[in-house]
Image: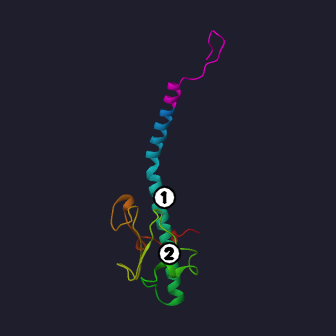
Amino acid sequence: MYCSNRRYRGFSFIEVMIVVVIIGLLAGAVTLSTRHFMDKAKQTRARSDLATYKSATESFYAEIGRYPSTEEGLTILVPKFIDKQRLDPWSHPYEYNFPGRQAAYEIVCFGADGRDGGDGVNQDITSDEVDVSEKPK
């Protein structure tokens, strides 16, 4: 801004604070409106991991002639059938059960809450729900 005494003035503290508050409000609105995309991405990654574990478990069965026991869990698949055992997208371990509730075995991701049951982002995802074709290439 140009003043009559030929000195330049900057923005006042109030003006800068108003701009910072407006930017903060916009960032908050964007974060809230895109959060469901992050939740959906985590569920997709969990399904992909389950498909990978399911494929590795079937490979284990084809080679060894049995499914891993509950005690052996997914750990027995490392390193021959999978590179490493991963946590789910919410940093909880996947649970392996032999026998499963609906199939010979079951691999479960308990969702964001890490507990059995739930809706939305807390919903359980099981190996029975995924197809091995969902496995990443």
The C terminus: image quadrant: bottom right
Q: Between 72 and 128, which is closer to the camera in this rendering? A: 72
Residue furthest top as drawn:
4
Residue 88 is inside the magenta segment: no
Eyeballing the image, is 15 above or below 67?
Answer: above
Give the mark count: 2
Residue furthest right as drawn:
6
- From the image, give the main secondary structure of the stretch colored magenta: loop
Q: Quadrant of residue 113?
A: bottom left
Q: Residue 116: x, y in percent?
A: 34, 68
Residue 16 is inside the magenta segment: yes
Mark 1 → mark 2, Cα distance in angstroms:
18 Å
Q: Residues within 10 Å of mark 1 (few under 14, many from 20)?
A: few
Q: Residues within 10 Å of mark 2 (few under 14, many from 20)?
A: many
**Residue at figure coordinates x 50%, y 25% from the top left:** 14
Q: Residue 11: x, y in percent?
A: 57, 23
**Lateral position of residue 80 relative to residue 65, left or right:** right
Q: Earlier in the sequence, mark 1 or mark 2?
A: 1
Q: Quadrant of residue 7?
A: top right
Eyeballing the image, is 35 above or below 113?
Answer: above
**Lateral position of residue 95 relative to residue 64, left or right:** left
- Reading the image, the residue beneath label 1 is 41
The disc label shown at residue 18, or none: none
Q: Secondary structure at mark 2?
A: helix
The disc label shown at residue 53, or none: 2
**Residue at figure coordinates x 38%, y 66% from the top left:** 124
Q: Residue 114: x, y in percent?
A: 39, 65
| Residue stretch rendered in magenta on the structure | 1-19
Q: Amino acid at mark 1?
A: Ala
Q: Secondary structure at mark 1?
A: helix
